[in-house]
Image: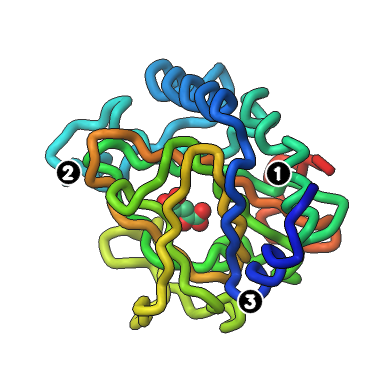
């Protein structure tokens, strides 16, 4: 069905839009169960390597690295049928096509898992500081809430309209070189976006966004898919797996 005119207008004005109920509860239950397996036993031979919470990996979090401190998987789509199916679900692809048009391709996917208690903040950034996609309007990120995302467990937060500011200067944060962030940001206009499991946040590659730590005893897991139109380009395309056309 795609996005309504109101949703599209909201997206282009603010740089993000919430799309409630894209996935039914049973699909999210299946995704949670597969994450539980991947977390407990690791991925299949040749599949993506789980990355630990950075502070845990550096021995600075007071807990040893374990299956309950896994932060991230990259590229489940090429290896995991269930995640490929979620990423190519018509309801999601039609919403994405409402923004970037067709054809729709997947350039990259990642899972940001905030483990209970140790799940850390993701500092404010624009995705295009990493992806460098041109033109930036021909890509959109879909952030799928696998668990309910709340104010307490680190839901997404956006700075409305910041996608119109162009790409800001991002520098590595002291002590956490994997994270790039602009300096001296005013976050006073930010909007927190709690989501039910199965809701999706679509956002522009230039919108500033971040998330706070997980203060709860439950996982906060998100499956994140970066969609792109074939007329757009990114240096990430080079030397990586080919894009997957989904609509
Ligand atoms: O899931 C999160 O907490 C952060 C996700 C994010 O920053 C991103 O997708 O760029």
Horizontal side of 171 relative to 234 (left or right) equals left
Residue 144 in percent (x, y) is at 55, 44
Q: As rendered, which of 108 and 224 lies closer to the eye? A: 224
Q: Which quarter of the rendering shows the C terminus?
A: top right
Count residues near mark 3 (Cα–Cα under 10 Å), then give few for <14, some for 14-19, many for 20+.
some
Residue placed most toward the observer, 187 or 139: 187
Q: Name the residue under label 3.
A: 13
- Which residue corresponds to the image point at 45% horizontal and 58% vertical from the top-left? 193
Look at mark 1 in the image and give the residue it sits on: 92
Q: How crowded is mark 2: few (under 14 residues within 10 Å), some or many (20 or more)?
A: few
Q: Which of marks 3 and 2 is in front?
A: 3
> N-terminal of the two: label 1 or label 3?
3
Residue topped by disc 2? 61
Mark 2 and mark 3 in contact (Cβ < 8 Å)? no
Left/right of residue 32 with respect to residue 137 in the rendered view: left
Question: SS class of the residue under badge 2?
Answer: loop
Q: Is residue 52 visible?
A: yes
Task: Name the residue: 79% across, 54% down.
Answer: 97
Observer-side mark, 2 or 1, equals 1
Q: Which tag, 3 or 2, sits closer to the chain's start? A: 3
* Numbered disc 1: secondary structure: helix
Task: Note whether 224 is above or below 123 in the view shown.
Answer: above
Q: In this view, does 111 lie above or below 142?
A: above
Nearest to the observer: residue 25 or residue 128: 25
Q: Which image quadrant for residue 92? A: top right
The secondary structure type at the circle numbered 3 is helix
Left or right side of 126 for 22: right
- Residue 97 higher or lower than 162, as above or below: above
* Residue 220, horizontal then vertical, whole percent: 38, 40
Question: Answer yes or no: do the residues labelled 1 and 3 have beta carbons within 8 Å?
Answer: no
Q: Is residue 180 visible?
A: no
Residue ID at (55%, 70%):
207
């Amino acid at each position: 069905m795609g996005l309504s005119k109101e949703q599209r207008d909201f997206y282009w004005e603010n740089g993000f839009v919430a799309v409630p109920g894209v996935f039914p509860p049973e699909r999210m239950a299946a995704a949670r169960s597969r994450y539980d397996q991947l977390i407990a036993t690791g991925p299949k031979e040749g599949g993506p390597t789980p990355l630990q919470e950075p502070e845990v990996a550096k021995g600075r979090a007071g807990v040893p690295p374990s299956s309950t401190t896994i932060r991230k998987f990259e590229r489940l789509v090429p290896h995991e049928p269930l995640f490929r199916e979620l990423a190519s679900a018509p309801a999601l692809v039609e919403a994405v096509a409402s923004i970037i048009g067709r054809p729709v391709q997947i350039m990259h996917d990642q899972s940001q898992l905030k483990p209970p208690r140790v799940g850390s903040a993701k500092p404010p950034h624009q995705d295009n500081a990493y992806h460098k996609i041109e033109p930036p309007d021909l890509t959109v990120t879909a952030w799928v809430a696998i668990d309910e995302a709340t104010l307490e467990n680190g839901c997404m937060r956006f700075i409305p309209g910041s996608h119109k500011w162009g790409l800001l200067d991002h520098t590595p944060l002291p002590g956490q070189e994997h994270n790039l962030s602009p300096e001296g940001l005013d976050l006073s206009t930010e909007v927190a976006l709690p989501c039910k499991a199965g809701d999706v946040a679509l956002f522009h590659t230039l919108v500033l966004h971040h998330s706070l730590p997980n203060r709860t005893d439950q996982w906060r897991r998100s499956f994140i898919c970066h969609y792109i139109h074939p007329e757009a380009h990114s240096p990430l395309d080079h030397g990586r797996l080919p894009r997957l056309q989904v609509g």
